[in-house]
Image (cartoon, helix red, strand yellow):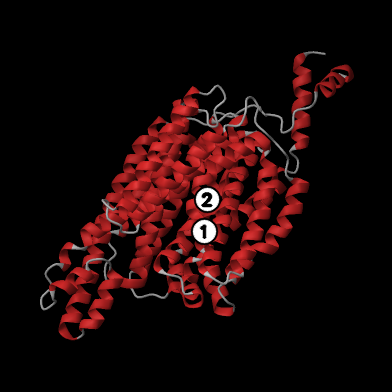
Amino acid sequence: MSGTTTAAALRRRAAGAGANRWVVLVVLCVSLLLVAVDATVLHVAVPAVTEDLRPGAIELLWIVDIYPLVCASLLILFGTLGDRVGRRRVLLLGYGLFGIASGLAALAHDPQVLILARALLGVGGAMIMPATLSILRQVFPDRRERALAIGIWSAVAAVGAAVGPLLGGFLLEHFWWGSVFLVNIPLMLVSLPVGRLLLPESKGDGKGPWDVIGALLAAAGLFGVVLGVKRLGGGEPVDSVFTVAPLVIGAAMLVLFVRRQRRRAYPLVDLKMFARPAFSTSVGCIVLAMLALVGLELIAAQYLQLVLELSPLETGLRLLPLTFAAMAAGLAGARMLRRFGPRSMVCFGFCLTAGAVVLLTAMGRADNSALMVSGFVLLGFGLETTLFGAYESMLSEAPQEQAGGAAAVGETSYQLGAGIGIALLGSVMNAAYAPALETVSGVPASASTAASHSLGEAYEVAAQLGGPAGVALRNAARDSFVHGLHVTLLVSAGLLLLGAVMALRLPRVMQCEAAEAVELPKPREVAESRVSA
């Protein structure tokens, strides 16, 4: 019969092969939820870990930071490896490693073992995160359905980031700190057999050898850059050798990686994807959106706890409207994308977020819960709208055989944006906060210098001073922090508007793609379908 009849038969077979795609999405979302929760669940357990294991200052820093460092560094390595050896295979190995590392972390008896376990969790997370997106790209070949799937996926990511501290706080009230890791094990034990049974296997085109040297260059380069950015965000001086060296060495390795990829006939990451305006613009939008989100969340948490003097649990509850709004935007994203197109959607998200940030500049020393809830709802909805449109455009622009590499690029952009946001907005905050504390009446110069490092340190110095001088220093520090918050919010609003301008390079309308086969029939099956037709 005609080629049209054959193509229709193949499309029907593809539709049948993807009949369980929504069940697959549930499995992928559960694994993503675990990785997202694990990135933040330890934050509230740090005091308990410190009391039990007695880590030094450097050891404690590595306990907290080693997971995101390792995870961000290995995303490209495992994303492209999945394109080569099979995305499901890498994902299932990630499940197993994540479960083993969780048990090791829960039973750690000294800081070194916990650091090792957290590093292994980062390796498992790097195997899981790009695989979830690339498999999602495969099982949802229709762009409209894929948009809805990405909306659900991104909403789950938002829930995981917010649930982490709340879950950690609940577990610490009833169990010991290791319980924050043990919760991963039963879910991984379920995910392994279910994933093996339901998830489809897929690979790239398999042309050429896998570039091991390139993968190691990318991993080492990203590790150095992310480490340097995190040290800047932690208040380390720019001229510190331990800050400059990782940045310089990491950047040099990434330059070598790019040059190597351009020369190779079969590169790990096809840099030609960045020549497509929709792909490169989407990556830039993800970086800017995460830059604003993580920096603002960090400063907002400090404001809620130190200025308004709310407990950690109350702080987490105050941030919940942001999460619920992000969930709503993720679930509504597919419909908005069809109606307005990527360009309008991402521009609107950036502008709405900038408006929310400007609204939050009205926050002061007094608690204004109505203003805060309104601002956080707009902030969550706007940022998730932006991230949804950017992720969907980026993934749709990438060829299916490069899905793992494209997903890894998107997740790396996410991690880099988060690190840069903490460093940049943290630096702006410190620059606006410190000057007002240089001359506080009745406060010695040494005390003023110590207080200028952070609001928490200012409160400690004020408590030591006591009397009118202590009260004056505490009030001055609180007022200075609020002023710094306002300046940081305005800078963030400017960056968000820059993102809205950048988004004008995205396509105006959503181009729906022809259905692609989830698993292409073999030549013999094609011949049989022609005979039967």
**Is residue 219 in view from this perspective?**
yes
Asked if 320 appears above or below 379 in the picture, the reply is: below
**Is residue 292 in view from this perspective?**
no
Indicate the position of residue 151 as horizontal and vertical percent values.
Answer: 56, 46
Identity, as a three-letter code, of the amino acid under mark 2: Cys
Is residue 169 or residue 389 the one in the foreground? 169
Identity, as a three-letter code, of the amino acid under mark 1: Ala
Q: Residues within 10 Å of mark 1 (few under 14, many from 20)?
A: many
- Which quarter of the figure is the C terminus placed in? top right
Q: Are marks 2 and 1 in contact (CB under 8 Å)?
A: yes
Indicate the position of residue 484 as horizontal and vertical percent values.
Answer: 24, 60
Q: Quadrant of residue 297?
A: bottom left
Kindly identify the residue that appears in the image at 27 percent across and 60 percent down: 485
Q: Which residue is mark 2?
A: 71
On residue 39, which mark appears?
Answer: 1
Asked if 129 appears above or below 339 in the picture, the reply is: below
